[in-house]
Amino acid sequence: MAYEAEGRQIAVDLAKRYGKLLEARLKLRDPCRIVLLFERGNWVVPADFIFKFGYYGSGPESFHAFLEASGFKVSLSQVVDAVPGTVLRRSAA
């Protein structure tokens, strides 16, 4: 549960700095590379950061919580089943 709370807090912190999250591009799984596209800039998630995808565990759970807190309608299964090249976009509305 602590990882999910951390993911939600990171969503709040990054939104203050960059605005609304518009897209998450999942580039590589190992080493993990995720690029987040915001209204006012992009942020490349450091490879050693908690956010991960492509398996069950605390990294994908934290990333899922982050995405939900950022307004994405995405399931944990979508994060777990994601492969390099997956692009997650903010839901319309």
Image: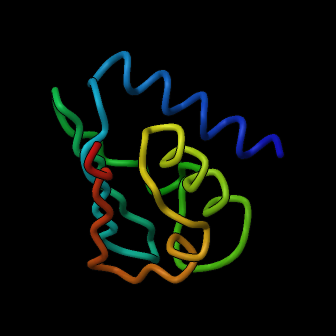
Nearest the viewer among 73 and 54 is 73
Colouring rule applied to residues: rainbow
Q: Residue furthest front?
A: 93
Q: Residue furthest top?
A: 16
Quadrant position of the C terminus in the picture: top left
Residue 92 x %, y %: 26, 49
Q: Please tell me how many numbered marks the rendered image carries.
A: 0
Q: Is residue 71 left or right of residue 62?
A: left
* Image-quadrant location for residue 18: top left
**For the point 17% across and 31% down, which residue is it?**
39
In the displayed structure, would residue 65 be above or below residue 58? above
Q: Is residue 78 left or right of residue 24?
A: right
**For the point 28% across and 57% down, which residue is it?**
89
In the displayed structure, would residue 49 be above or below residue 15? below
Q: Is residue 23 left or right of residue 4?
A: left
Q: Residue furthest right?
A: 1
Residue 78 x %, y %: 50, 74
Nearest the viewer among 92 and 67 is 92
* Image-quadrant location for residue 27: bottom left
**For the point 42% across and 50% down, which residue is it?**
72
**For the point 39% across and 48% down, which residue is it?**
45
Q: Residue furthest left?
A: 40
Residue 50 x %, y %: 60, 51
In the displayed structure, would residue 51 be above or below residue 1? below
Residue 37 x %, y %: 22, 45
Nearest the viewer among 89 and 32 is 89
